[in-house]
Image (cartoon, rainbow, N blue to C red):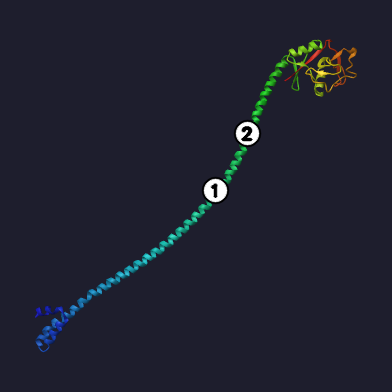
Amino acid sequence: MSEGVYENTDGFEDNKSNAMKNTDIDGQLYGNVGAFKPSRSDGVVASEPDSSGKRCFLVAAVCLGLLCVLLLAGIIGLSVYYNRAINDSEDKRNNLFQSFSLYKINATEERDQLQTRYNNLTRERDQLQTRYNNLTEEKGHIQAKLFVIEQYCQEGWRYFDSKFYFLSTEKKTWKQSRQDCLDRGADLVIINSREEQTYVFNLHLRAWIGLNDSVTEGTWKWVDGTPLTTGYWAAEQPDDYERQEDCAEIYYGQDDPVKTWNDDKCGTNHNWICEKVV
């Protein structure tokens, strides 16, 4: 009877027919009850896999939904973070650009100021260098001049206003006196100013000067050929006494230092004054 039950598990209809066939037989009805119950049991067992699949699907769907939500939240979070990062980067870039621009402006201004200062210092240095060169050159001239002055002073010359004056201790004619000056690398004194006239007068010497009118009477010229423009003649001089006085002398015995010249005979012996320009 147990073999008949397992043979009818393929279908509910077959079990039902067998049950109906055995309804009139009491023994067999109860005997087939076992066959009918396993069919219900089979139906329940067959429906359980479908419910498990649905539950798995629901669980998977829920998990997938949660993953999607998490993914969406992550994307939103990343987007917000990315936007903030971009904004921060833009702000930093703008700040850096502004700082760089300000630094560049300040650096340019400072460079221009330094360049101007450098140019001024360079110009000042050049001026100082020029001044130094001039002073060095002037120093050389002064040293050379002092050397010459020392040399001439040792030889009996006197110095005044860039000129040397030699006072003779002996007396000669005008022509001889001039030759002595020429031998000394000088010439008879030429008086060009009131100051020089006063200086020569204060030498307290009656002496020949480099002035004569030997070529043309009344036309007085200096030994360098220049004509007389300003004379310091004594009163009533020149008088060309006996028409023989053609050479000029300075005579210290006068009261007025700018009225001391006198014309005399060129052959008369007098002291003389030589002059040499440095």
258 lies above or below 63:
above
Left or right: where 79 falls relative to 98:
left
Residue 229, located in which quarter of the rendered image?
Answer: top right
Residue positioned 41% across, 63% down in the render:
77
Measure the C-alpha gap from mark 2 to mark 1. Answer: 32 Å
- Mark number for residue 126? 2
278 lies above or below 94:
above
Q: Where residue 255 appears, x then y in whole percent?
A: 88, 20
Left or right: where 53 falls relative to 68:
left
Sequence-wise, the earlier of marks 2 and 1 is 1
Which quarter of the rendering shows the N terminus? bottom left
Q: Nearer the viewer, residue 53 or 175?
A: 175
Element carrying mark 2: helix
Q: Local crowd at mark 2 within 10 Å, few (<14), some, or many (≥20)?
A: few
The amino acid marked with disc number 1 is Lys
Element carrying mark 1: helix
Q: Nearer the viewer, residue 25 or 117?
A: 117
Q: Where residue 39 appears, x then y in whole percent?
A: 16, 80
Figure disc tally: 2
Q: Where residue 120 appears, x then y in whole percent?
A: 62, 38
Residue 46, located in which quarter of the rendered image?
Answer: bottom left
135 lies above or below 114:
above
Q: Local crowd at mark 1 within 10 Å, few (<14), some, or many (≥20)?
A: few
Kindly identify which residue carries mark 1.
104
Residue 74, located in which quarter of the rendered image?
Answer: bottom left
The amino acid marked with disc number 2 is Asp
Residue positioned 45% across, 60% down in the render:
84
